[in-house]
Image (cartoon, coloured by chain):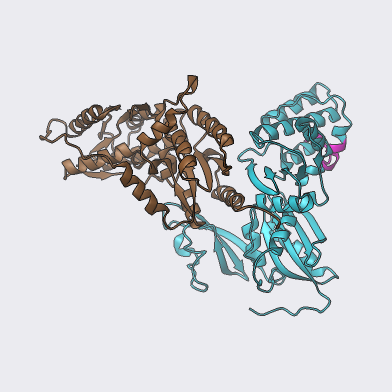
Amino acid sequence: MESPLVSPKAVPVYLGIDVGSVTTKMVVLAADSGAVLDHVYLRTNGDPIRSIRQVMARIEGDPREFQVLAAATTGSGRMLAAKLIGTDLVKNEITTHTLAALTIAPDAQTIIEIGGQDSKIIIVRERMAIDFNMNTVCAAGTGSFLDQQAGRLGMRVEDMGEMALASESPASISGRCTVFAETDMIHKQQIGVGRNDIVAGLCQSLVRNYLATVGRGKQILAPVVFQGGVAANKGIVREFEKQTGHAIEVFPYYGVAGAYGAAIYASKAPGERPPFQGFELLKRDFTVDSFTCRKCEEECTVLRLHRDAKAVSFWNDRCGRYSEAKKGNHDNGDTAI
Amino acid sequence: MKIGLPIELLSLEWVRRLQQDITQLLPDVRFCHGSGSARGGYQDIPLSEGDACFPFKKMIRTAMALLPEVDRLLIPRLVRLDGHLLCPNFRAFPDLVALNRDRLAGPGKETAIIDTVVEISNRTDEERVRVELIQALLGNSVPTFSTEFPKPESADDRAAKLTAKLGPYAKSIALIGRAYMVQDPHLNMGIPAILNGQGYGVITPQDIDFPTLDQVATRNDYYAKTMYWRGARECLGAFMHLTEGFEPAGIIYLLSFNCGVDALVRIELMSLHKKLDKKIPMMVLVGDEHSQREHVFTRLEAFLDVIDGITTS
């Protein structure tokens, strides 16, 4: 592999990228100090390739001339991101969020994370994660639901927190299910309940739902760290404090905590890393498509990455027929369709 | 004669032994099991399945797909094994298959369904049921056959098998769940294979003989919480037995969905887990809550990270 030319002024960094269902996050970590040199939080808008390309363009265009020593990806789009930037450092969101929280708050005992469609709780004791839970099919209480309701109420999601704090009498909203919550909200609007009270009631119900489902059976002990985009909502933070009885700590970089954890993970990867190839994404045409393999009854949906219209990588096949085939010896999938 | 026996039923040890015995007694019999992929000829046809879990619905589809291919469909009405009740869906299984067979004017409409009632608490019951089943299968042409059936596998044989199974792995995970969940890759979402691929051996309740598990589970029988469902006793006994003797690196409780019995087992296992002296990471996975394999993989990867210790140092 050809080593790219490195400017003597270049700043050695580690890179973490978190491709979530709603947003894409990136953190650049100084290799020497571990300081965050840059971070990005942008909407994925259903096009992760474009959002990752935006991230790469930002890093490449930074006047500080970053030299990426290693990069790691996380989030639901982590495999795709890893293929696009050419790294084998891929980690689940639980682990990266734990790494982020324990770096900022080494004594943390509980980590709450609520993102676009995921919510998690991680239980930490003596600086080690010992238990966790994630939401499953139900996205009640996550950022995308708040987005949706903000749109319906004709407000910006960013303003919801302040509105909730201004309420003195939160409306009673069902927290069991987003469909019921929405029905309740419409009803409250129809009978003339104020928007602040509706928003506060929504925050209350979402926290109740989180604690009853994601947090079910978990012992929440302080210090409690709150990460993910929803931590920006002060109404939700207040409700967590009320309903758990603990102070909730929201640290800087809460919105990019997954990417921050991924960068930390990259910094700890053992051995020498191959030269970073992520900027290829800006110079060549990358597309992804999929096909259903019918070689067996599993019928895997195999994902296929094309570089300049040529299939270069496969994943998501259970048996490894495509992903583990020797380079240049790929069945391009046509015979399997 | 071709006999259809849905592959899902083979997760029950008793059914596997029954098949062996029939094959031994009647060498001309050939068994067909179906692919069990739930993608058979009835994939897009709405069937009457009752308010059942996915494993049960899948079993109905496998049985329906077998009907046109076989001379007899063997789906015993399983009520009780080893003295303990099976999920009530098992006893309704032949009725639902017959209902769908008669409702749909498809091939296999004439195939006979053998639905002998199975209620076994002891050796005498077992021999009686097998004779009844074989008679039902063969109709009037019953040959003379011995009722001397081979003895079941001994606890020692099973322990030796388990040792061999775990041999290649330094660590193991206890994967606790009903037999059909743990053994069917379409239902368990490939979890055993994923764990093996990550270097972990997998111990299941079915690796241990049921009488041992039953005896251990008895210690937890009290007041209203006596587990009288066989599958529940198997899971409860396995949890207690494995955490006392094997010390797995982690425990996964795998269930299809929170039906009454499995919800109760879940609470019991979580309660027992909290009382363990040595903290072993435990995770509950509910099949119905994961439509994508990637979601399962994410949780497994994180679970193994917890076992290995997520730390910033």
Chain for colour brown: B
x%, y% of residue A17? 71, 59
x%, y% of residue A326? 49, 71
Chain A is which colour? cyan
Quadrant of image for the N terminus of chain A: bottom right
Query: Looking at the image, which residue is at 75% across and 50% down?
Result: A101
Residue A30 colored in magenta in the image: no
Residue A190 occupies which quadrant of the picture? Answer: top right
Q: Examine the rendering and report whether any part of residue B249 can be seen.
A: yes
x%, y% of residue A275? 68, 74
- What are the residue bounds of the magenta stretch? A152-162
- Assign the magenta stretch its main secondary structure: helix
x%, y% of residue B233? 43, 31
Q: Judge from the rendering whether residue A107 lies leftward or rightward of residue A75; answer left or right.
A: right
Above-or-below relation of B38 to A87:
above
Query: Looking at the image, which residue is at 76% across and 50% down?
Result: A106
